[in-house]
Image (spheres, coloured by chain):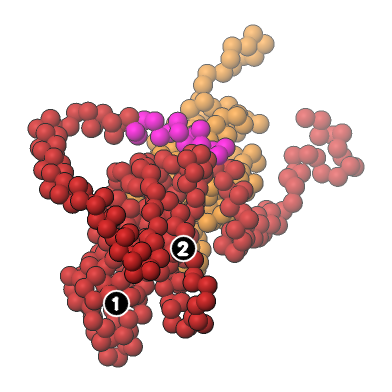
Chain colours: A red, B orange
Amino acid sequence: MPVAGHIGQGPPPFFKRGPAPLARLLFFLALALLLMAADLRYPAIESVRTALAALLWPLQKIVMLPVQGAREAGVYFADIARLQQENEELRERQLAQANLLLRQAHLDGENRRLRALLDMGERLDVPAKAAEVLYAARDPFSRRIVIDRGLTHDVQAGQAVIDDVGVIGQVTRVFPLVSEVTLLTDKRQAISVQVARNGLRAVLTGAGSGAMELRYLPANAEVEPGDTLLTSGLDGVYPPGLPVARVMRVERDNAHSFARIECAPLAGVERQGQVLVLGKRVAPPLPEDAPEQPKQSGKGRKASTAR
Amino acid sequence: MIQPTHSSRRILLPARAWFIYFSLLAAFALNLAPLGRVPGIPDWLALALCFWCIHQPLKIGMGAGFFFGLAMDVALGSVMGQHAFAYVLLAYAAGGLARRVLWFPLAQQALHVLPLLLGAQLVMLTLRLATGAEFPGLAYFLSSLVAALLWHPLSYLLLLPQYRPVERDENRPI
């Protein structure tokens, strides 16, 4: 390196390292903070994320191969006896449900005729498509899973996701081939529910670590441990009547204005397997000459803030 | 530029830029493995970034930390800029400690690295709690402990290409 040639022209290139480290640090930190604020406030950055995620997808796919291979090998070597037993159980359950299933079409028709007779709005059918849970997202601060249906399969953000027992969550981010489902147990997820026993409406939110909490009910609200919570359908996201959670513990303390009600999800929210993505729910139109809506009926609208 | 290892008399070959980036990319790919919410899986990318910032502070630094952090944010679905923020800080701290850390034996180097990694995790935790996420439990910090334990084998692995025999050269006696 001809150091001598640089004498008189400033420092030799060995010492030229661009801006000072502290300046660079501050620049990058400011940039990161700016991005974070933009991501939390404006939805525009989501499209950038989708594009970048599409670029990263091949790499993700390659990394997923060995893990999936190991899982499939585990399934392959599973005990045949266990599989046979499971098969037997499934067949029994199917037989037990056959009665309901066979009458379903008949009941649907009857329900439609009766609703027409009573001049009520028709219940809208919700189409559904099956999806497989690929993995749980690794972000430890939220509860999300990734399913193998995306933009190319017509999945949209906001669709409800259920399994064979009840509601799991809601699609919050859609990528070309996969989409991200925020589970009900996520702290920023809320759902409008109804107590099955008496029709009391409330908002259920995630409480972290796999639990949920029924919020904003007065201390003397009529909720007992063991009550089942169903979706109320008021939020316009989840169809009404789907099982969501069971009340585990009710703490009535008159010092607080609200009761503390802990619930546990019914569906296998934290387990993996097959799920069903329900089609986007179209809210039934309001009657034309409806009188001015009272303010309270907007309570359920608060649910379904998704992230 | 040939640099001596600090604890032995052995002279290492210069690190190749492509190998540095390849190892960072491999660490990123390892981070993408769909292992779910198992606690104690180290953040490979943070570890590799820390390693190169300490060993080659002139070649790798905050810029790489920022871009790999953004890639992590996209891949994991966390808030944009969360990993970038933490990795930039990590790269800065590791670069600042670079001249000191390498004079220690490997076990004590790991003790230097542990607070750096824990600090990066703490930064991410603070950022996310400030934006209303849930606390993931103390097991979250287990991954930094595991990563610090891996410092010793990782040092050998990542320095391996620099230990390769020097090419035969007629004009040079060594």
Mark 2, other Cα within 10 Å: few <14 / some 14–19 / many ≥20? some
Residue A220 or B120: which is nearer the viewer? Answer: A220
Q: Kindly report which numbered mark, 2 or 1, lies closer to the viewer in this rendering.
A: 2
Is residue A61 rendered magenta in the image?
yes
The image quadrant that residue A30 belongs to is: bottom right
Residue A119 or B15: which is nearer the viewer? Answer: A119
Is residue A155 rendered magenta in the image?
no
Chain bearing tag 2 is A
Can I make out residue A49 in this image?
yes
Task: Give the mark nearer the N terminus: 2 vs 1.
Answer: 1
Residue pushed farthest bottom? A255
Between the C-alphas of marks 2 and 1, the distance is 21 Å
Residue at which label 1 appears: A200
Q: Quadrant of the C terminus of chain B?
A: top right
Can I make out residue B91 in this image?
no
Asked if residue A265 lies left or right of residue B13, the reply is: left
Looking at the image, is A239 positioned above or below residue B47? below
User: What residue is drawn where x is 55% and y is 31%?
Assistant: B22
Q: Which residues are magenta?
A: A54-68
Q: Main secondary structure of the magenta part?
A: helix
